[in-house]
Structures are given as C-alpha cells and as structure tokens.
Image (tube, rainbow, N blue to C red):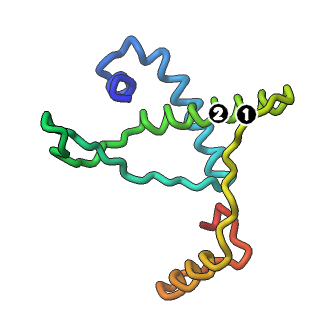
Amino acid sequence: YEQVQAAWDGKDPALLNILTPLYGAYQALLRYRNKRGALDLDLPEYKIKIGADGHVEEVGKRIRVDSHKLIEEFMICANVAAADAIEHHGLPGIFRIHEQPAPLKVEELREFLSSMGFSLASNARAKQF
C-alpha cells in the first residue's frame, strides 16, 4: 500500500504510467459503487506493536490512504470475478452471504435516528442506511 501511495504521490514517477489507468478504473468503480448504494464502511484500523517480551507495546491508528481503497476495490472485483467463474462452470464453492438485518435491530435504529431528527423508511435498502 505504501509503495503504491508513494508512487501516486509523485515519489516514483516511473510507476505513474501503470497507476494512472488503475486510478481511473478505480474512480469508475467508485462511481458505480456509489450509484448502486453500496455501504462504505471506511472504519479506522489499528496497528498493534508487540514488544520483545511478547506483550503489547503500542496501539495506534493505521493511516488509511487512497492506495488502500484502490487495492481493496480491485480485490473485491477479483472475488466477484472468481465467484462468477465458479457459478458459471457449476463448480462447488462456499460463499458468504450477508443476511438481512433483524427487524428488531432496524426498529431500534429507526427509533434512535428519530431521537436525533432523522428518519429511516420502513422498507430501507442499503443505500438508505
């Protein structure tokens, strides 16, 4: 991630010929992702440093830059392509399918949001969340 970001930031101009079309494709994927209302869970990650004694020495936030998002978006595309190929060829596979949220949890969220002046439709889809 750091090498890609450094190159994109201009520290390795030789890689810009490779990265420019990748970032262009990433921007197109991002527009499509936003259009279909995919959840964007851009949550902080933490880096844990273990000392020589085997105990936690330090916990700090991992800096998240555009290269993380670019690489992760292409990893998602690779996973989708692999799943499509598995299904197309009728091969067995294990897939993780996210269940719908429990109605009680959605109602609790609706009440919480209402207390802050927001509303959530009763038939809310991922885009509304």
125 horizontally vs 63: left or right: right
Front position in the image: 94 or 12: 94
Q: Is residue 75 above or below residue 102?
A: above
| Residue at mark 2 to residue at mark 1: CA–CA distance | 6 Å
Q: Which residue is mark 2?
A: 79
For the residues bearing labels 2 and 1, Cβ distance under 8 angstroms: yes
Q: Is residue 114 above or below residue 78?
A: below
Q: Residue at x 57, y 31 (%)?
A: 74
Q: Position of residue 125 (x, y in %)?
A: 69, 65
Q: Position of residue 106 (x, y in %)?
A: 62, 76
- Tell me the quadrant of the picture where the N terminus can be found: top left
Q: Quadrant of residue 76?
A: top right
- Tell me the quadrant of the picture where the C terminus can be found: bottom right
Q: Disc number at residue 83?
A: 1
Give SS at disc 1: helix
Q: Residue at x 66, y 72 (%)?
A: 102
Q: Position of residue 108 (x, y in %)?
A: 57, 81
Q: Disc number at residue 4?
A: none
Q: Quadrant of residue 105?
A: bottom right
42 horizontally vs 65: left or right: right
Front position in the image: 100 or 112: 100
Indicate the amino acid at tag 1.
Ala
Front position in the image: 30 or 102: 102
Q: Position of residue 97 (x, y in %)?
A: 69, 50
Q: Residue at x 71, y 39 (%)?
A: 94
Indicate the amino acid at tag 2.
Asn
